[in-house]
Image (cartoon, helix red, strand yellow):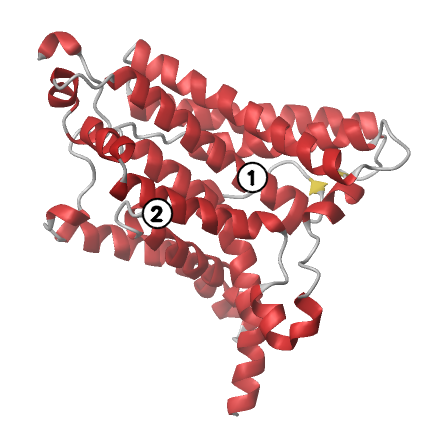
Amino acid sequence: MTMGFLNWLLLFIPRAIMQGTPLLFGATGEIITEKTGNLNLGIPGIMYVGAISGMTGAFFYENSVVAVNPVLGILIPLVSCLAGSLFASLIYCFLTVTLRANQNVTGLALTTFGVGLGNFLGGSLIKISGSAVPYFSVSDVSRLFRAKLPFASSLGQIGNLFFSYGFLVYLAVIIAVVASVVLKRTRVGLQLRAVGENPATADAAGINVTKYKYFATCIGGMIAGLGGLYFTVDYSGGIWSNDGFGDRGWLALAIVIFSVWRPALSIFGSYLFGGLLVLYNRINVPMQMIPVVQMLPYIVTVIVLVSISAMKKKENLPPASLGLSYFREDR
């Protein structure tokens, strides 16, 4: 019984980590954004744009060469993903920071725009590829992103649990840890948090509020975009199908609240939600119970939202100016 459960865990944990990685990218990026007071509900759209931008770069590069160069095969999709995510983030910044548009409406519009743009470009690439099925693939580039650490196979189960993933999995954890240290321990992080708590006071202290809002939102958007790239080139094996990304962007937003705006805690939250996403495939339940198991991530989301709302501890609350546009004239 014990060995059976152990074997189950050895199979379940890697799948949970792989499912949780795009959520971790999205949550980390949104935490950085929200720390300056920008509530970016466009994160699902930005992740979608990042995914299709990276796939577009990979598609044209892979189809223009006889043999894929390992460096270019990784670099081109990465740069394409970051450029697309940056473009989408700049749209949000221009509308909400410069023009002071409503953040909620802008974010939702950006999500709709991102998904629509992704499906348009994805459909166009499917036609260009001449595929008889509704998807296209970049298998050679995908193999580069999915490559395991060379010593993983020699470490047995330890290697399978900790060293058998593509480099983007480790990059997601590193970014979350670095973001946590920067926000807590550095002058930049202190000023960034000051902008989110009270932009008028930060402005009076000589901090450039607009610069910090642009900077954090764009950096956060590019990090979130990497989550979309990971899902397509690594988790999905380099296969793009329209609307295949699902609602992971919305779950990433929920993890921001679950982790009480702490990037390090979002690592645990992302892998927990990733495990809940794949749980129905890993347990034996009656067919009629499968929809209930599939609902678990969303049930947990509701419970977390209610719990956090009931807590009045200051350290668990969002930035005081979250979702509010800053008007310097109101100081």
x, y percent for residue 314: 11, 46
Residue type highlighted by circle 1: Gly
Instruction: Look at the numbered disc 1 and give the secondary structure of its residue.
Output: helix
Task: Tell me whether the residue at label 1 lies in contact with that at label 2, contact meaning CB atoms closer than 8 angstroms.
Answer: no
Q: Is residue 165 above or below residue 68?
A: below
Q: Residues within 10 Å of mark 1 (few under 14, many from 20)?
A: many
Toward which corner of the image does residue 165 lie, by quadrant? bottom right
x 46%, y 65%: residue: 293
Residue type highlighted by circle 2: Pro
x, y percent for residue 100: 27, 13
Identify the residue position indicated by label 1 in the image: 228
| CA–CA distance in space, label 1 to label 2 | 18 Å
- Depth check: 111 or 230 in front? 230
Identify the residue position indicated by label 2 in the image: 263
Toward which corner of the image does residue 160 lie, by quadrant? bottom right
Look at the image and tell me whether residue 252 can be seen.
no
Mark 1 or mark 2, whichever is nearer to me: 2
Look at the image and tell me whether residue 315 can be seen.
yes
Q: Which circle's residue, 1 or 2, is located before the other in the chain?
A: 1
- Depth check: 281 or 50 in front? 50
Instruction: Look at the numbered disc 2 and give the secondary structure of its residue.
Output: helix
